[in-house]
Image (cartoon, rainbow, N blue to C red):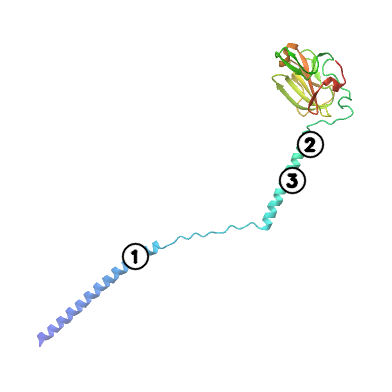
Amino acid sequence: MSNNTNSRDNKKIRALFSALCLCIIALGMIVYFSNTAARRGDTVNENRTLKVTETVPTAEPTTEVQHAVTVKETETAARKTEETTKKEKKEQTSFPAGESNTPYKSYYKYPLTEAVQRGYSEELSFDETMGDWRAHPAVDFTGSTGDEVTAINDGLVIDVYRDSLLGGVAVVDHGGKLVVKYCGLDSISVKKGATVDIGNKLGTLGKIPSETAQGAHLHLEATLDGKHVNPLDVMGKTE
């Protein structure tokens, strides 16, 4: 009787122990598979994550902004036009004609002496300095180095420069579309943009590089409306 009881108790203990072991094994497997599934889930979720870039539409300028820009551009253009007009008025480019400076009619003063060394000619003649045949659309006035050269009438100095063939040059607009070049100046006393009165000093006499054979003299060229004319005819003078 006692042996049977002990045998049954042992069987129960073994069954309980076996059940406990199975529970532990099952719990271990559950934990293992849970961790594995979790890791797989993270990988899947990570691979399936999409980067979404949100595009924000550019706002169109409002009517008020467009109007403000247009007004500003208009004001800027108006200011530039006004500044250009003022500059043109300040920098006079031509001299007005009047009763005292009308070509062929008004009084003109000799720029140097009254002695003419070489007259105006549109025909070809031999040039001793250059050694060739050429026209002479100017009048050469006799003088000495250092003599004072003066304006033949009122005018506006529109250019001053040095030339390899003509020496120092002062260009004066005497009005009525008459423009005169005073060539062969050693020193020049006026600047571009200056106004001069009849008889005012323009500079002192030097030499003409292209006419050195003639010695010191003033080479006077005149154009009327862009065409060469005899300075003496315009001045009402004779050789």
Secondary structure under tag 3 reads helix
**Of all residues shown, which one is farthest toward the bottom?**
1
Residue under pointer 1: 40
Residue 82: quadrant of the picture: top right
In the displayed structure image, the side of residue 47 where residue 99 appears, left or right = right
Secondary structure under tag 2 reads helix
Please tell me whether residue 182 is drawn above or below residue 58 in the rendered image.
above
Pointer 2 and pointer 1: residues touching (CB < 8 Å)? no
Name the residue: 17% across, 82% down. Answer: 12
Secondary structure under tag 1 reads helix
**Label drawn at residue 89:** 2
Q: What residue type is labelled 3?
A: Ala
The 10 Å Cα crowd at callout 2, few under 14, some 14 to 19, many 20 or more, is: few
Gap between marks 3 and 1 measured at Cα: 73 Å
**Label drawn at residue 78:** 3
Gap between marks 2 and 1 measured at Cα: 87 Å
Pointer 3 and pointer 1: residues touching (CB < 8 Å)? no
Please tell me whether residue 128 is drawn above or below residue 109 in the rendered image.
above
Q: What residue type is labelled 1?
A: Arg
